[in-house]
Every structure is written in structure tokens, then in C-alpha cells.
Image (tube, grey):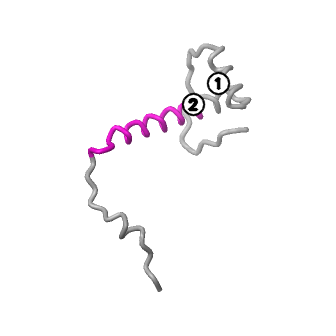
Amino acid sequence: MSIENTLDRMRTTLDIPESLIEEARALLGFKSKTDTVVLSLQELIRRKRIDELKSMMGKVRLEIDLPRSRRRSRK
């Protein structure tokens, strides 16, 4: 399995504990350390964005008529 990333790439050197990267790689089923790091970062970002949205719950007032918006026009 491989992650295709269409974003610009940046070559960098990281000091990551080998046991940590190997455990993540094995759990995700990747051969590539790069794919492991990319997917892990994407998942971290996704979860943080979800947390941000959850923290907004009840703070955003929407003027939506849900029953009306769910009705489909009859043709």
C-alpha cells in the first residue's frame, strides 16, 4: 500500500524514535516510512480540525428550516 501525495514535497531530516515509526508502520501496513509519516500527519490534522468543529457546537446560530430543507419538490 502506498500513499500518493499530490502536494509539493519537502525533503527533511527528522529524529524520530525508530521503535515508534516501526510500530506505526506495522499498524498501518506500510513498507515506506514516508507513507507512515504522511498518513499520520494527515490523520492528526483531520482529528484536530474535527475537534475545532466540535468546540464550535452551539456557538454558531444558523437560521435553517430543517423540515422544509429536507422536503423535495414534486415535479
- Apparent side of residue 23 relative to residue 15 in the rendered image (left or right): right
Q: Residue furthest front?
A: 67
Label 2 neighbour load within 10 Å: few <14, some 14-19, many 20+: some
- Is 6 left or right of 30, judged from the image as shown? left
The spot of residue 36 in percent (x, y) is 64, 29
* Amino acid type, callout 1: Ala
Return the x and y of residue 38 as percentages of the image width and height.
Answer: 58, 33
Q: Could you tell me residue 16's position as x and y percent? A: 58, 16
Range of residues picked out in magenta = 38-59
The label shown at residue 56 is none
Name above or below for residue 4 compared with residue 14: below
Q: Are marks 2 and 1 in contact (CB under 8 Å)?
A: yes
Q: Is residue 45 left or right of residue 38?
A: left
- Find disc 1 in the rendering and name its residue: 24
Q: Is residue 33 above or below residue 4?
A: above
The residue most toward the bottom is 75
Q: Is 17 above or below relative to 41?
A: above
**Residue 1 in the image, given as x and y percentages of width and height:** 73, 38
Q: Is residue 57 magenta?
A: yes
In this view, the residue in front, 45 or 37, is 45
Q: Quadrant of residue 13?
A: top right
Q: Which residue is label 2 attached to?
A: 40
Q: Amino acid at mark 2?
A: Ser
- Would residue 16 appear left or right of 1 to someone viewing this image? left
What residue do we see at 67% from left, 20% from top?
A: 23
Queried whether the magenta region covers residue 64, the answer comes back as no
Main secondary structure along the magenta-highlighted residues: helix
Of callouts 2 and 1, the N-terminal one? 1
Q: Residue at x 59, y 34 (%)?
A: 39
Q: Secondary structure at mark 1?
A: helix
**How far apart are labels 2 and 1 at the CA level?**
8 Å
Q: Secondary structure at mark 2?
A: helix
